[in-house]
Image (spheres, rainbow, N blue to C red):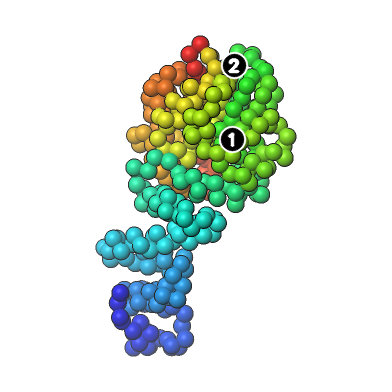
Amino acid sequence: MTSIDWRARLTERGFLGARQVPCMHGAAVLRSWGEVLAAEAALRELLGRAPEDEGALRALMKLLLETGRSEECVPLRRRLHARRCRELGIPEDQWEASVSFLEAAETGASETARAADPYVAALFDQYASHFDDKLRGDLAYRGPEHVLDAVCETLGGRSGLDVLELGCGTGLAGVLLRPLARRLSGIDLSPGMLARARERGVYDALHTGEITAWLAASESRHDLIAAVDVLVYFGALETLFAHVAQRLAPGGLFAITVEKGLGPGYQLQPTGRYVHRVDYLRACAREAGLAPLLEREAVLRTERGEPVIGHVVVLSASA
């Protein structure tokens, strides 16, 4: 930590009112003058009083990166993500996995195979009250419609199905799948989302839990398993696909959406969502004994006004 008197540097450079200026403003002025160490001192003074101040943390990280001191960003980044965990209401004893995941998303670490369960549950509990309005209004979300169209194309007129929806959320897809179902079940990590789904009255059963573990423990068989906008929180899909294959009835369908990736396999994005390359999906399906019936690209939603391209895929269990 630098011991430079940054206020004195402001005064020496003719800045009026240096003794009263807020730290963030002083740091910005000093950086504009090329006084990097003095700017750092101002930011560290602020963080000494407010250790999780987001603006100061990000400004100091940017300064450190620009001066070739990236290793010093690690504790600051973790402090920033701990702040996010507190905002989401994640219990402190569950912070480690969530902080590590958020750090991986920000830095592009590829070894992280899936999102942290406490983070996903807390994130969607927070979103539950306005989730539908956000997705349908702001993001023009059409994933459920794309999956329904794909499923109807591959069902061959079948109905009266036992349907399981993975990551059912508030039930946006469940409403569309209900007419196909003799029995419709849903599972989600977020109790808040499930409460909204329950209000729709379209599910015969709703379960709270992590979907891979739930599938592994289940003994039920289903004619259709759907995962709409869920696999974006999984990177590696081999284990999930294997469990799904075990839970499909003969000839059963697995219908999914993923966001389109251009690199090999899967990549974690700064948004905290994964993208997948279609040939990776094919490899996971082949390993699990699932056969492709339909693949197409579609606009799943928008992000900052730009279309988000994804893959809509329907796989079949052996008959």
Would residue 140 appear left or right of 266 to someone viewing this image?
right
Q: CA distance from mark 2 to mark 1?
A: 23 Å
Picture disc at residue 187 = 1
Q: Is residue 190 above or below residue 225?
A: below
The label on residue 259 is none
Residue type (three-letter) at the residue carrying disc 2: Leu
Along the line of sight, the residue nearer the viewer: 10 or 155:
155
Q: Is residue 153 above or below residue 197?
A: above
Going 54% across and 17% down the picture, which residue do you hit? 249
Q: Can you name the residue that lies furthest to the left here?
A: 68
The residue positioned 41% from the left and 75% from the top of the image is 48
Q: Is residue 203 above or below residue 158?
A: below
**Which residue has dot 2 on it?**
155
Q: Position of residue 275 (x, y in %)?
A: 43, 38
Q: Which circle's residue, 2 or 1, is located before the other in the chain?
A: 2
In the rendering, at what x and y percent does residue 205 appear? 66, 31
Q: Position of residue 299 (x, y in %)?
A: 53, 35
